[in-house]
Image: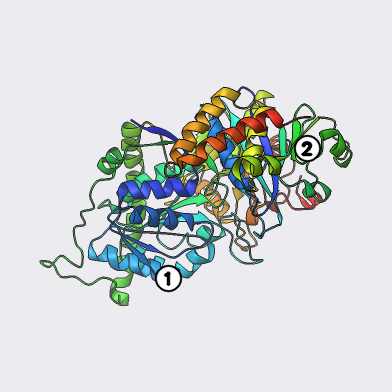
Amino acid sequence: MSRRDRLSGNEAIATAMRQIEPDVFAMFPITPSTEIPQYYAQYVADGKVNTEFVCVESEHSAMSACIGAEAAGARAVTATSSAGLSLMNEMLYVAASARLPIVLAVSTRALTGPININHDYSDSMAERDSGFIQIYAENNQEAYDNYLQAHRIGEHKDVRLPVMICEDGFITSHAIENIELENDKDVKNFVGKYEPENYLLKSENPLAVGPYGISAYYMEARVAQAEAMKNAKQVILDVAADFEKNFGRKYGLFESYKMEDADIAIVIMGSSAGTAKAAVDELRESGIKAGLIKIRVFRPFPGEELAEALKNCKAVAVLDKSEGFSANGGQVFADTAAACINLEKRPKMINIIYGLGGRDFTIDAAKRVFARLQKIADGGELGPVYTHLGQRDLRKEAQ
Amino acid sequence: MSKMIEIRWHARGGQGAKTASQLLADAAFMAGKYVQSFPEYGPERSGAPITAYNRISDERCPIHSNIYTPDYVAVVDETLIETVDVTAGLSKDGAIIINSKKRGDEIRSLLHGYEGKVFTIDAGKISRQYLGAYFPNTPMLAAVVAVSGCVEKDQFLQDMETSYRHKFEKKPQVIKPNLDCLAESMREVRE
């Protein structure tokens, strides 16, 4: 039986962690993720969990401590944001290449500069190549549900990769909304015990973790890691199916919203997807065939599935909440466009950078994007492919 | 979807607008509603104007933008009226609720021609009387519930009693003053 409650995204993630009760939590605080270790410290102090709670001196050390613990055979977790994630960068690659299924909660936040504490995906997008699986949430419920699925995905023998569970800083992390929480016992049963095949403390099979890989072996290790990331797709779907069987809520690689007959569509992630769905509903009422795809799993990228879902659209806008400074569009756009490149008939596609540093994304903003798509779908000019939405001076926005 | 109620809170950093919006969400949640309570964070510093928001509805609300056309506005610190456009986008069928010793018609001229209802409550006086200190949140919460009707009055008081019994388990002597403070505030808020 689930229980109705109302929690912020941070408390929802901390609750999931408490229910799973990892062996080690290595913590270093940074806004807006700080509440996660804060709540967890309370659970430790109250004797609700038996976790080794390690306060370290930096995020680099937090990830290093997780790597040590996970390599030893323990289940290790941490949480961070923004510059904290950047400081972990070196160790994220170590965790992924050593095939250690650490789970990292990220309350996503802009990177400097200007200095900004608010939400965008510049922190998580900068780590898209680290080898972590990345799963994004629209709200507190999805952050909780994704977290409950994370360990099983990462620890699966076909995967063995670390997992980043991303929620939107402040918008999700600090917003209180209704949530369905599962019973501690049901969660423990669903997640199961961590039983790694090989680990440092297994005396009958001594092994090295993280050694030098000469050129004759390095590439094989990287290809094996790439294969694991490809395998993760099916494992994510299998775990989601079992999650639905147990708890009733359905998840896929992405969510298709009113896409069956959509002429125009937005591809988007996170909390903004909810706002954009409200725009889709309004447009549908006036007979416009608008649809939406919300990417849940960004790594591994669901390219084939996404191309299949978009192939019948006339015009598609990919929305990126991170300015990658490629001068050619954002990260989600690059992957979506690449995924569609070999379709026989493919939609016109534009990229829109939005919501940087907490710039609000409204129903009206989403409708402006759809209005531009409708013009393109009706045979109008494509216009600039890569633009920015919602600047102070709206005259700068492509119509 | 049946009517969703949107509320915007104005206060200064440290006065607890975020807490007030969370308390309102708690009250609405206990009454079986779907709630959102979220703050708008700027450069956090004590005394700076801050904003917090509530959405209350019968179904889960997917929208995660700020609120630009609220049904109700609550102003915890009346000095903000001079520097912040507190009635911006406020529905004229709704109302503004201001923590002030003055009456609504004495303040209306400062509200940029706002045509809707203006309520005031002396939250400072009531909180000092019942709680012995300046806690404007408790009276403001009650005033917003009374004016907006987002939760039925008796149910609200009953739910808050349950909530206080849990929250003040180790300080049962403060439960009654808090409940009396809520009830008095619901009577005292006026146009």
Which chain letter matches label 1?
A
Relative image position of residue B123 (x, y in whole percent): 69, 41
Q: Is residue B166 visible?
A: yes
Residue A362, placed above or below residue B187: below
Query: Residue at 41% of width from left, 37% of height from top?
Result: A251
> Circle 1 — which element?
helix
User: Could you tell me which residue is drawn at 61 percent across and 66 percent down?
Assistant: A112
Q: Is B10 placed left or right of A309 in the picture?
A: right
CA neighbours of label 2 inside 10 A, class few (<14), some (14 to 19), many (20+) = some
Tell which of A285 and B97 is nearer to you: B97
**With respect to residue A67, does B160 lie above or below?**
above
User: At 59% across and 54% down in the image, what residue appears?
Assistant: A119
Q: Chain of mark 2?
A: B
Please determine whether, in this image, residue A14 is positioned above or below residue B183: below
Q: In which quadrant will I find the N terminus of chain B?
A: top right
Q: Mark 1: which amino acid?
A: His
Q: Is residue A289 left or right of residue A195?
A: right
- Image coordinates of residue A105 in percent, x first then y, are 43, 55
Query: Dividing the picture into quarters, in which one does residue B125 lie?
Result: top right
Residue A45 disc label = none
Residue marked by disc 1: A60
Q: CA distance from mark 1 to mark 2?
A: 46 Å
Q: Label 2 belongs to which residue? A: B89
